Image: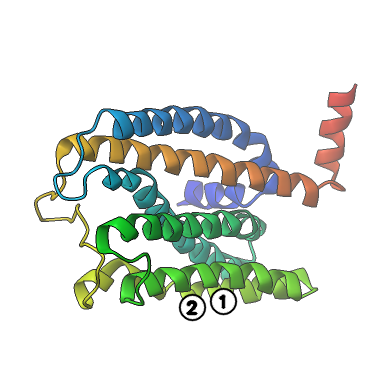
Amino acid sequence: MDWIKEKFHRAGSPRYFYLGSYAWILGCYIVGIVLLGAGTVWGLWFTPPDRVQGEVFRIIYMHVPAAHLSQLIYIATAVAGFVYVVWRMKMANVFMVAAIPIGAWLTAIALFSGIVWGIPTWGTGWVWDARTTSVLAQLFLFLGLIALRQVIPDEHRAMMAVAILAMIGVLNIPIIKYSVDWFTTLHQPASIQIGRPVSIAMSMLWPLLINTIGMYLLMAGVILARMRNLVLDRERETEWVRSRFSQSAG
């Protein structure tokens, strides 16, 4: 148990994170871009058209990864908020600041791509059903977290408010996830469900999985890079930052 405590405390150290994050960022960028490029090319040019939707289904290779990752980022933000409220860990604060705008952008991309997909598929780009409304609520939650941090001048109070709102807002995630099962919606059910046969052809599934992993890794790299810059800015007056950059200058 002692090594778990040690790892936990080291993970909360801005200095340890800064010194150890560069390789992870580089790896996430390289592998993420390669996978995202490969999955996109495969999905757009080498996958057969859907027998019902035709060519328009190809937007799935952007829509689904963005939608899934935006929800995962919100859950991670809520977990980081809990860690910040309970343990006052600096890196939880840094993660929230870095990740929330990325989650907002991904949610906006998921909504926009869903509208583009819906117009030829359903004959409408928007309906106020449970799935689209709950995803829109997630976008408003992300924007609310950004605004809340900016309007409260004291950083600690601002991040406490952000953490609490994030934890409350995570209740929206099950609604997004199960809305197509609980309510009548235009949105189709999930193609991949645990314990059930996959309802998407494997020729379409593989590039989707590759794109999803690629987007996960690329956005992980972006968030880590943003965290690294935030750490450097916040710790610029500390001895370890001064000594590190004085050595670099020398």
Look at the image and tell me whether residue 124 can be seen: yes
- Distance of label 2 from label 1 (alpha carbons): 6 Å
Residue 55: image location, x then y, percent: 26, 42
Label 2 close to label 1 by CB (< 8 Å): yes
**34 shown above or below 241:** above
Front one among 69 and 90 = 69
Q: Which mark is residue 168?
A: 2
In the picture, measured across the screen, residue 52 lies left or right of residue 142, that is left
Q: Which mark is residue 240?
A: none
Residue 19: image location, x then y, percent: 67, 35
Mark 1 is on which residue type? Ile
Picture residue at 55% right of the left edge, 76% below the top: 165
Label 2, secondary structure: give it: helix
Picture residue at 21% right of the left edge, 77% below the top: 184
Residue 63: image location, x then y, percent: 37, 51
Front one among 12 and 109 = 109
Picture residue at 53% right of the left edge, 72% below the top: 141
Residue 243: image location, x then y, percent: 86, 34
Question: What coloring was used for the rendering?
Answer: rainbow
Residue where numbered disc 1 is placed: 164
Look at the image and tell me whether residue 85 can be seen: no
In the picture, measured across the screen, residue 195 lies left or right of residue 26, that is left
Q: How crowded is the residue under tag 1: few (<14 C-alpha within 10 Å), some, or many (20+)?
A: some
**Figure disc tally:** 2
Mark 2 is on which residue type? Ile
